[in-house]
Image: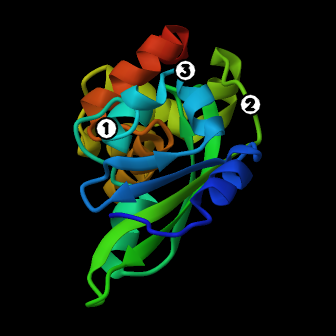
């Protein structure tokens, strides 16, 4: 992806003047450009950001999380947005992604805009407060090793309801599996499940 505008410097200056986190990604989720706010948040030199995959830098994962709006946007060829808690950065973000298209209409990347929302720093108490009472019950039983049907029977709810709460918590903590969910929560607040 290249730009050939003579106004690149003006655009770069304008984007660097905002506190909104902005970047341009290619179709493999590699960051092609990043504004000063994103560079500052990540605490890395631009050379340690450009060319690296967003999901590795932001989420610490080997692939984009399931709730990634950029992944959905490239697949559906439409603007997508999502808000979620990113424990690795310690903040809640609203992410907006719009696909970029080449001359033939094929996607060539996406514009990624993130805004910090709600709490700016996630404490253990804030993580705990973000979970509903039912989610905490499901989580405790999940941590004790029970499977969905056993959790449902013990809480007198349907297995689909257990699955719904587990999926919501996985999304909230950017976890790709129940094991990763437990690991992330235990690393943030072990008292929550004991």
State the CA–CA distance, disc 3 to disc 2: 16 Å
Q: Is residue 113 above or below residue 48?
A: below
Residue placed at 60% from the left, 28% from the top? 41
Is disc 3 placed on a helix, strand or loop? loop
On screen, residue 88 above or below 111? above
**Residue 20 at x, y = what percent?**
70, 48
Task: Residue at 58%, 37% (x, y): give it.
Answer: 38
Instruction: Classify mark 1: residues with Cα within 10 Å, few (<14), some (14-19) or many (20+).
Output: some
Which residue is pictured at 47% across the width and 31% down the height? Answer: 46
User: Residue 5 location, x and y as percent?
Assistant: 52, 69
Residue 162 showing in the rendered view = no
Of the image marks 1 and 2, the number of the one nearer the N terminus: 1
Relative depth, front residue between 93 and 150: 93
Under circle 1, the secondary element is: loop
Q: Are marks 3 and 1 in contact (CB under 8 Å)?
A: no
Where, by quadrant of the figure, is residue 16 drawn? top right
Residue position for label 2: 120
- Tell me the quarter of the picture where residue 148 sits: top left
Q: SS for tag 2?
A: loop
- Of badges 1 and 2, the one in the foreground is 1
For marks 1 and 2, give the CA distance.
25 Å
Q: Earlier in the sequence, mark 3 or mark 1?
A: 3
Task: Assess disc 3: are there few (<14), some (14-19) or many (≥20) residues with their C-alpha within 10 Å of its C-alpha.
Answer: few
Of marks 3 and 2, the one in the foreground? 3
Toward the viewer: 118 or 53? Answer: 53
Give the image location of residue 47, x and y in percent.
39, 29
Residue pointed to by mark 1: 52
Cα separation between marks 3 and 1: 14 Å
Q: Nearer the viewer, residue 3 or 113?
A: 3
């Amino acid at each position: 992806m290249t730009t050939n505008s003579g106004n690149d410097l003006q655009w770069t200056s304008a984007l660097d003047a905002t506190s909104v986190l902005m970047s341009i990604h290619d179709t493999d989720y590699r960051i092609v450009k990043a504004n000063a706010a994103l560079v500052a948040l990540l605490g890395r030199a631009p050379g340690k950001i450009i060319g690296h995959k967003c999901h590795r830098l932001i989420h610490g994962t080997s692939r984009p999380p399931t709730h990634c709006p950029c992944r959905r946007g490239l697949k559906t060829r439409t603007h997508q947005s999502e808000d979620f808690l990113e424990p690795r950065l310690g903040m809640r973000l609203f992410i907006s992604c719009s696909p970029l298209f080449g001359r033939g209409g094929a996607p060539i990347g996406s514009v990624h805009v993130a805004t910090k929302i709600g709490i700016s720093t996630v404490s253990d108490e804030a993580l705990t407060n973000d979970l509903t009472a039912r989610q905490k019950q499901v989580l405790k039983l999940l941590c004790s090793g029970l499977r969905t049907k056993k959790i449902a029977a013990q809480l007198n709810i349907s297995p689909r309801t257990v699955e719904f709460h587990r999926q919501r918590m996985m999304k909230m903590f950017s976890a790709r599996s129940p094991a990763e969910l437990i690991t992330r929560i235990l690393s943030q607040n072990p008292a929550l499940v004991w």
